[in-house]
Amino acid sequence: MTMKPNPMVILTGPTAVGKTALSIALAKRINGAIISADSMQVYKYMDIGSAKIMPEEMDGVRHYLVDELDPSDEFHVVRFVEMAKQALKEITANGQIPIVVGGTGFYIQALLYDIDFTEQECDSAYRRQLEELAETRGNHYLHEMLKAVDPASAEAIHENNRKRVIRALEFYHESGERISEHNERESKKTSPYNFAYFVLNDDREKLYRRIDARVDAMVKAGLVDEVARLQQMGCHADMVSMQGLGYKEILAYLNGTSTLEEAIYIIKRESRHFAKRQLTWFRRERDVIWLNKPDFEYDDTKILTYMMDVLQAKGILPA
């Protein structure tokens, strides 16, 4: 008798679309526990800028990969998969259904398809050379170098995401293969899970208004004080955690390189761009089920009913 693959529910979508509230309602309905697929909520002390779910909002639902690392820790896709797999084991052992919730599509893909991101031995001299180039010539110059050898990666990676640009250049330097081709080949793998991959979405204008309102609410809730506290703890712009959207811009304001108005404007603009890139990513993914809020008249109960039907049809829930 073949073993039935373990179940996994994914709920993702662009920033500020309303994943959190829906994920709690879903977890309560299906006896689920939540694994956060968010590159910022994993950090302690970074609550406001990451729009982190607070304990009172969790409503008794167990969350993994929230508040687990210090801001000085590095967090990347390999670390995420490692921690998420551990969480999956625990959730399954507790007889619950894992729900992966968050907007980092790259992390979700890696976990869902068990993708190998080959942590090769890296040539640290070459990495230093690239870092120096970025310092002296700027991120754009480095991104143009990537565009010359791997246009598909350059398209997928924002030039300010220096770490991933360097990683892609390193990969090409070490293996002679484009990382985009490696990832493309890996992404054709079939998933070892019995999964349902939901993407929550909204009309663009409504989403952008929600993003703007959310940024204003973050500032009102004390984002500047939060970043100032992190700075006092010794956090600085070179840390992975402080590269997060909302943190690096406020850091620039605190360091006197921009006004608060400019910082807020940039956070809003970059959040909209981020939402756009997230949607591009999800449109390229296989097997996704779109949950367009207008189709459900913005009623989470209707969305939930539809999700339950899908989960029963896939055998994730008993019919």
Image (cartoon, rainbow, N blue to C red):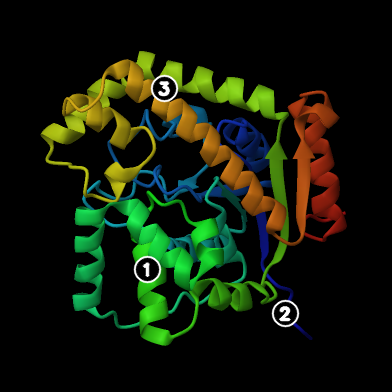
The residue pinned by badge 3 equals: 265
Amino acid, disc 3: Tyr
At horizontal 79% and vertical 34% (from top left) the residue drawn is: 303
Q: Is residue 164 at all visible to an observer of this figure? A: no
Earlier-in-chain disc, 1 versus 2: 2
The mark closer to the camera, 1 or 2, is: 1
Residue 152 circle label:
none
- Please indicate whether residue 116 sits to the left or right of residue 45 in the image: right
| Residue at screen point 49% across, 33% down | 271
The residue nearer to you, when weighing 95 against 238, is 238
Q: Nearer the viewer, residue 189 or 92?
A: 189
In the figure, is residue 192 to the left or right of 289?
Answer: left
Mark 2 residue element:
loop
The residue wearing badge 1 is 167
Residues at marks 1 and 2, CA–CA distance in whole angstroms: 37 Å
Three-letter amino acid code of the residue under disc 1: Arg
Q: Which mark is residue 3?
A: 2
